[in-house]
Amino acid sequence: GTSNSSSKSKSSKGIGGNKQLHSHLDSGNGPLPLPVAISKVKDSFSNRRSTKSMEPWEFACQRFYRELLRHSWLGTTNPKYTFHAPVCMIFPEITSIYEQRIEKPMDLTTAEGKLLQGGIYESPQNFIDDIALVFTNAISFNQTGRDDGEHTSASYFDASKHLLRYMRWLSLDILSPFLDDDPESFESPGQGPIGSWKLTVQYKDAARKEMESAVFPIMEKSDEGDRYNWLETECEKLLKTLRHQSDLRYMTFFIKTAFPPDYSYYISKKMDWEICNDKLATRSYDSIGQVVDDLRLIFSNALKYNERGKGTESVSGKAYESAVYMSRRLEVAVQKMLTSVSDKLERDKLDQIAGDREIESVERQEEVRAREKRDRELYEWQKKRQEARAKESEEVETRVEVRETVKLVPVQRKLPQKKQMVDFEFPFHDENDNHEESHLEFIRQQKILLEKQKKDKISMQKTSMSTGLSLFAKMLERERLICYTTAKQNIFQSSQNVEKPKDNVELQSGKMCGSRAPFCGIPSPTTLDISHRKEIEIKLCIKRRKVKPKRK
């Protein structure tokens, strides 16, 4: 991002604003508002030429500068980032640090003033280098703050990198008539911003490929019938650009084409503007590259089919000339779309990063404030605790002194003959013997009661455990008895099924002879259950009540 030696030698001319800048800084004035700072820089260039007296390349540079200021981050009314005036005018508190780090300060208004004054820049390359120097200075100055995690420095660092990349795309597009063909000076920039580049055809092709690789593969589809999203809207703008009123006489052949009978012999895939519009409306495109390919196919088909009428006044000749003209118009529109979409994709990504970084910064500040509040509350609590302890120690010392004074008074008292010791210490507060003995007795009673409760608790646990074990044994025995009874029933049923024909014969013979069926000798399941349970038989005696005769 450094200028040529010629621009360096001539940069001292017409920068009278530097004198005003140094006088402003030496006077110790505070920061200037942005409109005031811009006005001061413009006033320092008195010989501002009009656009009519400019060279063609100077006029193209002026158009590039105006297009750059239309960026949403660089609007002059309320810009998101400030690159329009010298840093030392807007932020005088960092003047010494800025001058130590940056050798050649530059801002957008100063570069424009040098262009309008004339005689300073010898070629478009000099002007582009000064504009790039604005953003490379910002990158160099804010890199340290970004590494340290400062939110403002990180935001300016990322924004400067993107704006440097955006102005490279824009300058190679607008200044394309003044590009040189110099393959030897080309160095592949790869992805991302670069500090300097040459206005050559090779750099333009590299920038075009860079944007195509970022834009062509993407497409966000909305539901059919709903409003277009922003990517679909860009594709719609591209279609409408081809149907502009000024180009309508050339586009008439391609809006809704009446294909000749032999068209399919020359062209494999038919395409016109209406087909592209319908495919966009039905959300048939999966990427922006497919839209651009179909639009290019319209004119490539026309060039291929109407090549026989090239240079004639026939319909085919006019269609051929219209296809040549509209294909150039299409590439210009595609270039603008690529620049705007690439810029918006990168801006949205950086805005998201800046928003997340700002949220993290606010959360970090909240954590610091909360930590300071906790430390302050802890300090106050410790201070109050120390004061309370100091006060308590003073009271204890006073009580000890009084107690010692009382002990020195000769008082005759009866000591208990036998003093039972307890297993814990108890403070002595009164010198009355009766009170001391009663208190010790109360403590002994409480201790006896506590030991009794412990013994009762242990005995209750043992009783509960024995009861539970006996109940569990009885339940286990009952379960085994039920299983045994069930097995016996199954054996009885199986044996009965086997002996059933024999029993039927005996029953029939018994009936024939008029006798009862013999008993098989196998007890019933109920009898087995009763016999195993060893239940006592109950005899029921029924007495007949005698009825007394009625008296007549």
Image (cartoon, rainbow, N blue to C red):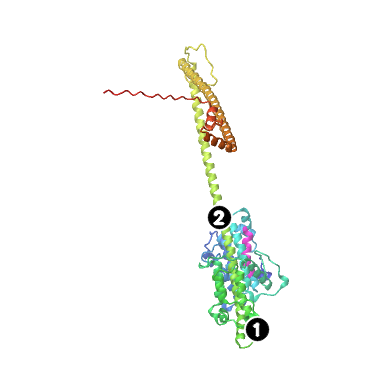
Up the image or down, 356 lies above or below 120; here it is above
Task: Residue under label 2, please give it.
Answer: 358
Disc assigned to residue 307: 1
Q: Quadrant of residue 542?
A: top left
The amino acid type found where label 2 is placed reads Glu
In this view, the residue in front, 256 or 343, is 256
Can you say which quadrant of the picture contains the C terminus? top left
Q: Distance between the residues labelled 2 and 1?
A: 60 Å
Q: Secondary structure under badge 1?
A: helix
In percent of width and height, residue 118 lies at: 61, 74
Q: In which quarter of the image is residue 496?
A: top right
Up the image or down, 153 lies above or below 434; here it is below
Q: Give the prevailing secondary structure in the magenta stretch.
A: helix
Residue at 64 percent of width and 71 percent of height = 172
In this view, the residue in front, 203 or 226, is 226
Range of the magenta residues?
A: 128-142
Q: Does the magenta stretch include residue 129?
A: yes
Up the image or down, 93 lies above or below 184; here it is above
In percent of width and height, residue 40 lies at: 54, 67
The amino acid type found where label 1 is placed reads Glu
Q: Is residue 500 magenta?
A: no
Mark 2 neighbour class, 10 Å CA radius: few under 14, some 14 to 19, many 20 or more: some
Disc assigned to residue 378: none
